[in-house]
Image (cartoon, grey):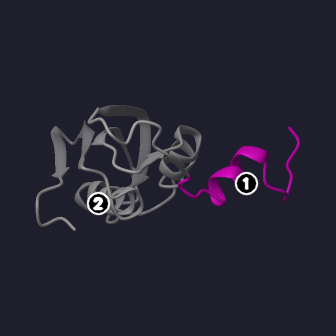
Amino acid sequence: MIISDTMLYGEKSVSEAAIELWDNPHTGRDYEIKIDFSEFTCLCPRSGYPDFAVIRITYVPDRLIVELKSLKLYLNSYRNRHISHEDAANVIFNELYEKLRPRFLEVIGDFNPRGNVKTVIRVISTADSA
């Protein structure tokens, strides 16, 4: 086995992750974009054990849409982050809402059971989200 002190290209991409935005090609129409990220991981802030979830993002874009590879890398950046289920869903929501300013946004963190406890966190935009 070769051990290297240099980052692999995937690790480098994740460490430099930033959400990239594109212009919405259909600003005159309301349409829904649904994204499922089925391999989300983060670390429990208390135990350090890994948590696994499906992150479901639904939004109606206004002027901007999210570029999917950049979103994937951004979500992968949580892998070694100590963060609660509630905070993870809310931080992801806040980041997307701030950048996209969508007409509607919902982020669901559907976390796998651990210790016989299943958690689903739903964060949704309302009229006072701005």
Residue at x 21% of width, y 42% of height = 115
Work out which quarter of the rendered image holds the C terminus and state it: bottom left
Q: What numbered label is drawn on residue 12?
A: 1
The residue lying at 42 percent from left, 52 percent from top is 42
Q: Which residue is mark 2?
A: 84
Image: 58 above or below 63: above
Sequence-first tag of 1 and 2: 1
What's drawn in magenta, residue-wise?
1-20
Pointer 2 local density, CA inside 10 Å: few below 14, some 14–19, many at least 20: some
Task: Indicate which label's residue lies in the foreground, 1 or 2.
Answer: 1
Classify mark 2: helix, strand or loop.
loop
Q: Amino acid at mark 1?
A: Lys
Residue 82 placement, left or right of 121: right
Asked if residue 107 is positioned above or below residue 15 in the image, the reply reads above
Q: Amino acid at mark 2?
A: Ser
Outermost front residue:
28
Taking depth in this image into account, of 120 and 49 the one nearest to the observer is 120
Query: Picture coordinates of residue 45 (x, y %)?
Result: 35, 65
- Are circles 1 and 2 on residues that touch, CB within 8 Å? no
Residue nearer the viewer, 101 or 110? 101
